[in-house]
Amino acid sequence: MSPAKSPPSSNNDGRRGYLDWRVSKFIDLFIASNTYISSLDTGIGFVSGVIFAFAIIFGYKTIILVSQTINRKMKKDPNVEAYIKKYGSLAPKRYHSSDIKKMTNSFREKLGEGGFCSVYKGKLEDGRLVAVKVLKLDTIKGNGEEFINEVISISRTSHVNIVSLLGYCYTENRKALIFEFMPNGSLEKFIHKENVSTSGRLAWEKLQEIARGIARGLEYLHRGCNTRILHFDIKPHNILLDEDFCPKISDFGLAKPCPKESAISMVDARGTAGYIAPEVFCRNFGRVSHKSDVYSFGMMILEMVGGRKNIDIAADHSSEMYYPHWVYDRLQQGNNLGLHGVMTSQDNDIAKKMIIIGLWCIQTYPVHRPSMNEVLFMLEGSLDALKIPPKPFIYTPTRSPINLCTAPIL
């Protein structure tokens, strides 16, 4: 008699082996039942044997179905499971769906909502306030690449101007990210004229400090990390402000790790209309690189100065539709910049400096733009040291480009 087989360990890697062992045992029983049936005479014993055989077959099929279901679930989110296995204790804390419901008090206080997610105020067990970003399940593409991409990208960072990820939840019925709470919300509500009456206009010195903080955060992503991270969605809405108005870059859903000495092919380029660099939209303008984030930063700086969207199709005059061109012409001619809240010559110098830096950042070709290190140097320097750049070509995409171009990242 051959020795009895023992079942394999039932850890994650052995789950399939364990099921195969159970199926094998059912097959052995099925063969035994056939032998048993053949040895019976007609009558009740034979009927009992047939019923027993059918029970064995039904059990076998049930095990196969369970095995297939588990395998499908394991294949559904390979990126998430691979991430957890790779980073182990270094990964952010993983929460269950019930934990998310508890920390948000059953999603009582909504901080904001977008096309892809809703954000709720929450509190951890240690009393810390958090912002819980709950993704809308019908907007998640593929097997959660964007979600895990955001988790991985932020987990690699540690900087005062990058928002801190405190944990995440990834279950079949809920995907959520838990961030440190930013009491002053996004930069967007402090720079647009229509919001100033309710949120208050920031002083020009404070705007300059915020611009420097964002520049430091981007410079860190481009040079301070072991792997360069390209954000691809720098805009006022994605800059959060703490209680002291210290800016923190958030929303890494579109970010891409980019080895500093390697080229990456980027398909399905995305971003937000009005902030997308030309080369992200089409490779004819150049190669996608960290200079693409510089372009977005420049458009954001000009928006901070102008107090309006850079592209306004409802403007009274066609010359005012594209703000970078309008402000460039006034700057070059030495005319009044027509800015709100400029009270002193110091305010005027700060505004003018930010405009010149913004115009350098949005040069049409990446090679003509400064790096974020150079941008930071200009922001911390004097106005007299700056030269007015060439006028950038007009570039006004009306929508976010998706699948329009394939561009290599260098």
Image (spheres, grey):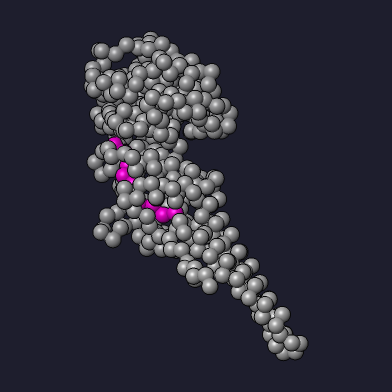
Asked if the stretch drawn in magenta spans residue 200, the answer is no
- Which residues are the magenta region? 161-170
Q: Residue furthest right?
A: 42
Q: Please provide percent x and percent y for residue 232.
A: 44, 32
Which residue is farthest front? 1
Give the side of residue 404 with respect to residue 348, left or right: right
Residue 8 rendering spot, x and y as whole percentages = 46, 63
Q: Main secondary structure of the magenta part?
A: strand
Q: Residue at x 39, y 18 (%)?
A: 369
Up/down of 160 relative to 338, above or below: below
| Above or below 41: residue 199 | above
For the C terminus, the quadrant is: top left
Q: Residue at x 57, y 66 (%)?
A: 24
Q: How many marks?
A: 0
Camera-nearest residue between 1 and 96: 1
Residue 86, position in %: x, y?
38, 46
Q: Quadrant of residue 154?
A: top left
Q: Is residue 223 visible?
A: yes
Question: Viewer-proximal residue, 312 or 12?
Answer: 12
Q: Who's the residue at 56% across and 55% down the image?
A: 72
Q: Nearer the viewer, residue 333 or 24?
A: 24
Horizontal side of residue 174 vs 92, given as left or right: right
Residue occupying the point 35% across, 32% down: 227
| In magenta segment, residue 168 | yes
Q: Is residue 347 left or right of residue 82?
A: left
Q: Position of residue 404 (x, y in %)?
A: 58, 28
Is residue 316 visible from the viewing direction of this image?
no
